[in-house]
Amino acid sequence: MQEWSKNKKKESKTICFVPTMGYLHQGHISLMEKGAPLCDELVLSIFVNPTQFGPNEDLDSYPSNIENDLSLAKKAGATAVFLPNKENIYPENYQTEIRLKYLPDHLCGKFRPVHFTGVATVVTKLFNIVMPDMAVFGQKDYQQLQIIRQLTLDLDFDIKIIAGDIIREKDGLAMSSRNAYLSKSQRASALSLWQSLNLAKELIAKGEKDSGKIKHKMETFFKTFSQTTPEYICFCDPQTLDHVDSIENQVLLALAVKIGKTRLIDNALIDPSR
């Protein structure tokens, strides 16, 4: 992969990179379609990174369909697909980690303590291997997006980070590879994430500024759905991810919810002046 990229650079070709863990859906495709027109080459990586999974998480059961992924990648305009295995990325005696100080202490990082160190480490390695000019990350993983932006800035990567929109099913559920875990009844309950975001938007539009009051109404709303337990509901500064008590400016509303054993995330940027 690195040799391929070096050769493209010698030909003065530009490279756009979309890193994924595979089991591609329309959300991933939208990232490739966003990146394809911006560079000469579009590289997709598929690697289920073990270091970003904690104990009792779904590493061993994470869905996979490489043949379908390759077909979708080709249709979306990918000119190369990087398919490393664990031994390629973390060879024997590997011992280096990339760790951020502050951004991982919020949202998902509170509940998945090893996750973002694993993400930052593997993305750093992938950037060094693929050597892209730009990379596209989805906004559904908003905290991850902010961490990658900070990582790129701090480590002086000459890479432009592009945000891809959240892609939703027709009924509003944010597309995720983990949606495949949901039963029919759980799939219906999973709509509570999108609906709760809309509930918050309506309350803010009516003039409610107290994030605690909005959060309480959202928690009450979630209780009306079976097998549904919020892990967190947070109103944050979109840049720092620090908690916001009074909603005066644009705010990130981020949430993680367990539907049965499946953990789903979603978010919305909300501007009270609009």
Image: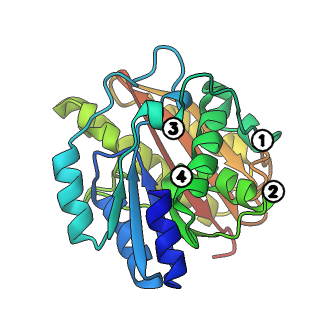
| Colouring chosen for the image of the structure | rainbow
What is the quadrant of the N terminus in the image?
bottom left
Mark 3 or 4, closer to the camera: 3
The residue pinned by badge 1 equals 100
- The amino acid type found where label 2 is placed reads Asp
Residue at mark 4: 267
Q: Residue at x 35, y 47 (%)?
A: 83
Count numbered badges in the picture: 4
Numbered disc 3: secondary structure? helix
Query: Which amino acid does the dot numbered 3 rest on?
Result: Ile
Tell me which residue sits at (75%, 35%) in the image: 105
Q: CA distance from mark 4 to mark 2?
A: 25 Å
Residue 79, placed above or below residue 263: below
Q: Earlier in the sequence, mark 3 or mark 1?
A: 3
Dot in front, 4 or 2: 2
The mark nearer the N terminus, 4 or 1, is 1
Disc ID at residue 89: 3
Q: Residues within 10 Å of mark 2 (few under 14, many from 20)?
A: few
Judge the density around disc 1: few (<14), some (14-19), many (≥20) Cα neighbours within 10 Å.
some
Which is in the foreground here, disc 3 or disc 1?
3
Mark toward the start of the polypeptide (2 vs 3): 3
Image coordinates of residue 232 in percent, x first then y, are 60, 33
Residue 221, how many percent across, how many down?
A: 46, 37
Can residue 31 be seen?
A: no
Task: List x then y, in percent, for residue 270.
Answer: 62, 63
